[in-house]
Every structure is written in C-alpha cells, then in structure tokens.
Image (cartoon, coloured by chain):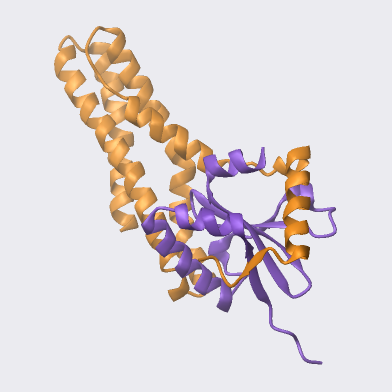
Amino acid sequence: MTLLPMRSIKTAQFHRRFQRLPPAMQRRAREKYKLFQSDPHHSSFAVKVVRATESWEQPHWEYRISKGYRATCYIDGHTYVWVFIGNHDEFEEFYR
Amino acid sequence: MFAVLEQKRQYIESATVALQEELSNSIQLSLLAVEVKSLVDDCVRLIDDAYALDFEMHEHAIDFSSEEWERQYRPLDSLFQELPAIARRVISLAEKIARTGESVEFTNLHAKLVQVEKDLNWPDDYGATAKYRALAEEVHRDYLAGNVIEGGWE
C-alpha cells in the first residue's frame, strides 16, 4: 500500500492573518511550519483537538507556535486546511 | 539561559518574602518603596525573559527531537505555571506600599500578569458556540469551492 503525502492549503483569511503577524513571529511560524512538514506530531506543537469539535466529522486541531500564538486546522482526506493563526486576543475575537 | 531565569525567580521570591517582613516592621517606607519598585521591574523582566526563551525554544524546535525538546522545555513550562503567583505576590506588596501613600507603579506588571494568565488558559470550549460552527462551515464551503491557497502557513 502506498501512502499519499499530506498537503497543506490555507484560507485567504489565514493568509491575511499570517501577513499581519509581527515580523519576528512570522519568522518563528515559518520555522515551526518547516518542523510541521518533517514532524507534525513534534511535542513543541502540543497538538490537541478542539474539545467541542471532537464529535464533528472533521474536528479542528490546535497547534502551538509559541506560548502566545496558535494555528488551527482541520483535516480533509490528505489535506490540512489551515483556518487560523494568531495570538490569544485574535483567537478570542475570531472564534467568539 | 533557563538557569539564569531560575536564579531570577529565586531572587524575586526571596526578596518578596523579605520585603513583606520589612513592611510590617519598617519605619522607612520611602526606602522600602524604592526596593519594591525595583522588585516590580525585576518581575517584569523575568516575565519578558521567560517569553523570550519560549520564543527562542519554539523557533529552534526543529533542531531537537520531540523527546529532547519536551525534556528541555519542561522547566520553562513549570516556571510559566508559577509566574502568576509570583507576580501576584509582588503586586500585593506594591499595593500595600501604595496604601501607605508611597508611590509605586505596577501597572506594567499587572498587564504582564494578565497576559501570562491568558496564555496559560487558552479556551478549549469555543467550539461550542454557534458562531464557531457557522465559521467552520463557511471555511469548509470556501474549501469545497476552491477558494483557498496552496502551500504552508506563509
């Protein structure tokens, strides 16, 4: 059996949010994404499913970029669909 | 770098206890106020340094195996768990000094405390809201319609 490689896509909103990150955080996020490509389960991501989406067909996953920044996605087949990237206040504003 | 942070933490904790004792006996409140102001600044720097180390460790996470990174990060994670209590004790001391009429500014430390508490308590119940569900469905519709961008986070 051949495993298909996973691919990543992002929403336009995710892209805009990335561009608005402070330059130092953009650099950090780039490094964390490189790590994600090689080891998506690395302990530094502290990956967790968003509790209230656990029962959904496509639950959402939260990845730690640093203490104060997160990225979220869901998985559709062989695709990570990136939904959000930002800090705590932006996260609250985005989801609440 | 963590060893330096740990030294600073120990210094702040012992200085807080010492200054609390001095406050109950002190007749030289103006001198004490200067020391507490310095302690507030030290505490702000401790929090800033902890964030700086957190940033650095995440930025270089790719250089470590998952197990090694977790082992190295654990002490910093523990420090973050302790920071709110440390900051609250320093703020409490500053408040006591302020009540005597001496000027001690701790707004900055209070703002840092709020930030640390937020970052330690990321909500995990937001998915229960109708807005989140609607947002998730909207994002998925965009995805199905192809309104997305190929590639990683950038």
* Residue A63 visible to an observer of this rendering: no
With B30 as the anchor, is B132 left or right in this view?
right
Which residue occupies the extreme bottom position in the image? A1
Which residue appears at 62% of the width and 43% of the height?
A94
With A95 as the anchor, is B99 left or right in this view?
left
Depth check, front residue: A92 or B75: A92
Image coords of residue A71 (percent x, y): 58, 57
Q: Quadrant location of residue A90?
A: top right
Which residue appears at 75% of the width and 86% of the height?
A3
Which residue appears at 35% of the width and 53% of the height?
B52
Q: Quadrant of the N terminus of chain B?
A: bottom left
Q: Colour of chain A?
A: purple
Image coords of residue B47 (percent x, y): 36, 42
Image coords of residue B30 (percent x, y): 15, 14
Q: Colour of chain B?
A: orange
Say how many tags the image has: 0
* Residue A58 visible to an observer of this rendering: yes
Residue B81 higher or lower than A26, as above or below:
above
Image coords of residue A40 (percent x, y): 61, 71
Residue B121 higher or lower than B70, as above or below:
above
Which residue appears at 41% of the width and 68% of the height?
B60
Depth check, front residue: B104 or A1: A1
Depth check, front residue: B146 or A19: B146
